[in-house]
């Protein structure tokens, strides 16, 4: 029997319906002005442009606005920092998203750190990460926060379970590990250079694929009855997990596409609405 489908697309649509009501109340309080998410795209990477477009569409679906800032490929770190400063100072902007990756001449970490904490709705700053890790209020990285929300929605037990996270990026692997730890899971963080990886994955109740390599995590590594969350997406509609052979023997799984991806966007929009509510003293 196939495992439960952790349907991020369906849940994201439900979240958007709830957000539309909250945005309506915000607009009433603000004299019709909508919450605004500013998206910064540097360069001409087509995948990044597609992601920014998708986020703008989600904003419009809930009644928000997206302020699209497009900068040329040759933009310098100083120029990008100046634009971020402008957005930080703009009271009409409630959230700021710097699309990753940026061109190689830009100091990406410095630019992430320039985003004001109150507008860091994508959870990319070190201060936001640290606050999240310590259990203090902060907007968590959007993809990890979306994963945890998806697991909670489908009543996947976390407390006391062994979660293995394969991947250690600062915006996915590390934050999702800490979010699961804060939910009282026992967490092992692995990566592409981990020795004995297959054996570690076999011991997992929950497997999080976040390594960024297509079908890197093999089906044979995953035990029967595990929960499989695949945060990867690669050409050919495959993720980081060799998923097809696991579907009939896992407890639950995220489809690719339609699992984690929609939750990333829904979480980003949700956190922007929350930032706008904080700005207007609602909550």
Image: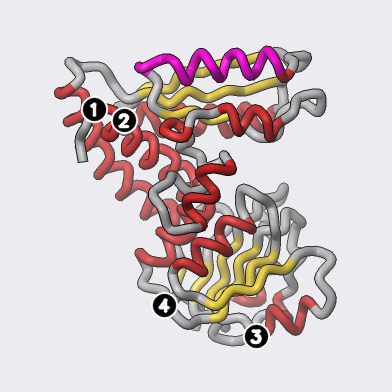
Sequence-first tag of 2 and 4: 4
* Residues at discs 1 and 2 in contact (Cβ within 8 Å): yes
**Residue 194: which quarter of the image?**
bottom right
Gap in angstroms between the C-alphas marked 1 and 4: 36 Å
Sequence-first tag of 4 and 3: 4
Per the image, the residue denoted by label 1 is: 280
Per the image, the residue denoted by label 3 is: 203
The span picked out in magenta is 78-92
Q: Nearer the viewer, residue 59 or 244?
A: 59
Q: Which mark is residue 276?
A: 2
Gap in angstroms between the C-alphas marked 4 and 3: 16 Å
Sequence-first tag of 2 and 3: 3
**Mark 1 secondary-structure assignment:** loop
Q: Is residue 195 left or right of residue 225?
A: right
**Residue 58: which quarter of the image?**
top left
**Mark 2 secondary-structure assignment:** helix
Gap in angstroms between the C-alphas marked 1 and 2: 6 Å
Sequence-first tag of 1 and 4: 4
């Amino acid at each position: 029997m196939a495992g439960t489908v952790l349907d991020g697309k369906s849940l994201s649509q439900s979240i958007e319906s709830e957000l539309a009501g909250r945005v309506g109340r915000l607009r009433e309080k603000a004299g019709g002005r909508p919450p605004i998410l500013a998206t910064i795209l540097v360069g001409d990477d087509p995948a990044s442009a597609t992601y920014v477009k998708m986020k703008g569409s989600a904003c419009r679906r809930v009644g928000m606005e997206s302020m699209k800032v497009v900068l040329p490929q040759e933009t310098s770190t100083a120029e990008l920092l100046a634009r971020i400063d402008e957005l930080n100072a703009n009271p009409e902007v409630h959230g700021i998203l710097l699309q990753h990756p940026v061109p190689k001449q830009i100091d990406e970490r410095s630019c992430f750190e320039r985003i004001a904490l109150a507008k860091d709705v994508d959870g990319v700053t070190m201060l936001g990460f640290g606050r999240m890790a310590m259990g203090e209020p902060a907007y968590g990285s959007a993809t990890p926060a979306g994963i945890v929300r998806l697991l909670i929605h489908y009543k996947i037990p976390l407390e006391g379970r062994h979660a293995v996270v394969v991947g250690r990026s600062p915006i996915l692997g590390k934050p999702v590990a800490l979010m699961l730890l804060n939910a009282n899971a026992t967490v092992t963080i692995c990566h592409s250079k981990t020795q004995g990886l297959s054996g570690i994955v076999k011991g997992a109740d929950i497997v999080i694929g976040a390594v960024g390599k297509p079908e890197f995590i093999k089906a044979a590594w995953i035990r029967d009855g595990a929960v499989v969350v695949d945060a990867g997406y690669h050409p050919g509609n495959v993720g980081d997990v060799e998923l097809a052979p696991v579907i009939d023997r896992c407890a639950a799984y995220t489809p690719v596409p339609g699992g984690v991806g929609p939750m990333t966007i829904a979480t980003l929009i949700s956190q922007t609405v929350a930032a706008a509510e904080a700005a207007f003293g609602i909550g």
